[in-house]
Amino acid sequence: MSRRSVTKLASLLALVAIVIIGVYYVPFTMFSVQPKPEQAPQKIYDYYIIVEEDTKEVLMYVPITVNVGDELVSDQNKRYKIVKIEENQAYARFVEDLNLELYKKDG
């Protein structure tokens, strides 16, 4: 082997060694998915006022804890989904009108 080819081989081996060491020592936390920070626990109230998100019309008062994602059916057979809660006021977004005749059994 010539001296020039030995030098190239040594350079190539050094480069490979640097790459392997670099990959081995790269902190894997750099590539991990970071979890969402946990939300502060919701304060519990004696009752909640559920209002329509756009019109601010009061839909109902409930003596239970409500959470984002909960659903309700109004006295006018309209289905809503809770989208936001501020203190003891929950905001509900209209989802659909329900036809309860479809759920009645004959006889």
Image: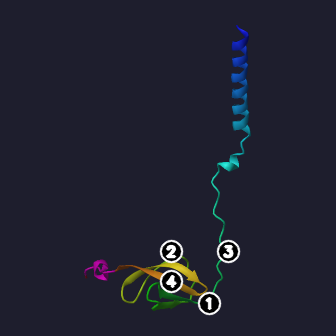
Residue drawn 71% across the image and 13% down it: 4
Q: Cβ–Cβ below 8 Å for labels 2 and 4?
A: no
Residue drawn 73% across the image and 34% down it: 21
- Which of label 2 and label 1 is nearer to you? 2
Q: Cβ–Cβ below 8 Å for labels 4 and 1?
A: no
> What residue type is disc 3 on?
Ala
Residue at image mark 4: 91
Query: What is the quadrant of residue 33 in the picture?
Result: bottom right
Left or right, 49 with respect to 11, comes to: left
Residue drawn 71% across the image and 42% down it: 26
Left or right, 12 with respect to 65, comes to: right
- Which of label 4 and label 1 is nearer to you? 4
Of labels 4 and 1, earlier in sequence is 1
Residue at image mark 1: 46
Q: Give the color scheme: rainbow, by chain, secondary structure or one colour.
A: rainbow
Counting other residues with Cα less than 10 Å from the Cα at mark 3, is it few (<14), some (14-19), or many (20 or more)?
few
> What residue type is disc 1 on?
Asp
* The residue stretch that appears in magenta: 98-106
Q: Considering the image in quadrants, where does the C terminus appear? A: bottom left
Q: Cβ–Cβ below 8 Å for labels 4 and 3?
A: no
Which numbered disc covers residue 40?
A: 3
Q: Marks 3 and 1, how far apart in space?
A: 19 Å
Q: Cβ–Cβ below 8 Å for labels 3 and 1?
A: no
Counting other residues with Cα less than 10 Å from the Cα at mark 1, is it few (<14), some (14-19), or many (20 or more)?
few
> What residue type is disc 4 on?
Tyr
Q: Does 27 appear above or below 96?
A: above
